[in-house]
Image: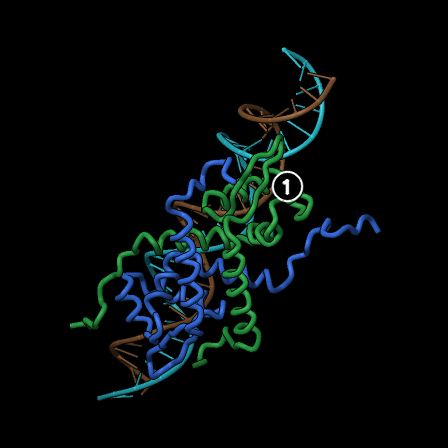
Chain colours: A green, B blue, C brown, D cyan
Amino acid sequence: MTHMSSRAIIPANDRRERDLSQAIRVLGEPNRLRILYNLGLECRFVSSIMDATGMTQTNVSFHLRALREAGLVRAERRGPFVYYCLADPDLLRILNELKSWLAAHSPSDSSDSLIVC
Amino acid sequence: MTHMSSRAIIPANDRRERDLSQAIRVLGEPNRLRILYNLGLECRFVSSIMDATGMTQTNVSFHLRALREAGLVRAERRGPFVYYCLADPDLLRILNELKSWLAAHSPSDSSDSLIVC
DNA sequence: TACTCATATGCGTCATAGCTCATAATACCT
DNA sequence: AGGTATTATGAGCTATGACGCATATGAGTA
């Protein structure tokens, strides 16, 4: 026989993990990340984000939509403006955790060499 | 100089944030996430991951390379085998934090409607 | 050396995602 | 209603990424 070790069969992506990868994928886009960090804890309207990032209006709206549909930001209309804000401040905390994790692990790390452990 | 207000000008993607989005992008791929969760805290060699996930050898190697270059996993050669393991257990913790954050925020959330706040 | 097993890599293909242009929808004002 | 400002959306182009095939590299063994 080949090998039939403890957990041989495919773990069958549970829904949680799919959602997770979907959300992470949304987070991973550089411009979207910029928007998130630019938002910080305050709400800003689209034009403000445009000015801050230098991105096109269409493009900002495009990315905001992705962020919105992933549940990462919320949108509120005030008059002609639409304000966007983080769905939850904890998200920023988690992102920063990941950020500092990377900062702690990537620099001296010889991550591209093969024999490491 | 033109204007120099608080944060008018493009924040000029600092390196940290670029690395962050790069790493997150790597994390966001469903198969890579499966591999990571499949690894858990133990080291496994490529064939083992192939069996566990049902992915092609080429594809597993492809994704492992991405994970490796992002500093998310480490590789160690033992004889003809190459064992891969998480670069750090904390990564799993952070992922799970994000996972539960999403679980707490996405389900009942009317994230796709516009007027929310 | 030759042969086998395990893994990595170059190349080509295909699908998806990001971007822009043009235009639509929505709100406000006169 | 008409006019202006703000944001959203559909169509099309392009670049990027994931995948498979073939092949190369490397380790072990006879």
Q: Position of residue B41 (x, y in %)?
A: 35, 74
Q: Is residue B86 above or below residue C17?
A: below
Residue at the image point whose x is 60% and y is 45% from the top: A43
Amino acid carrying label 1: it is Thr
The crowd level at tag 1 (other Cα within 10 Å; few <14, some 14-19, many 20+) is few
Give the vertical position of D7 relative to A85 (above or below): above
Describe the element under mark 1 as helix, strand or loop: loop
Residue A45 at x, y = what percent?
A: 62, 40
Q: How many marks?
A: 1
Tell me: A99 left or right of A2.
Answer: right
Going 64% across and 41% down the picture, which residue do you hit? Answer: A56
- Place of residue C16 in the rendered image (x, y in percent of width and height, measured from the top left): 43, 46
- Is residue B52 visible in the rendered image? The answer is yes
State the residue lying farthest toward the right. B1
Pointer 1: what residue?
Answer: A56
| Image quarter of residue C15 | top left
Horizontal side of A6 relative to B81 (left or right) equals: left
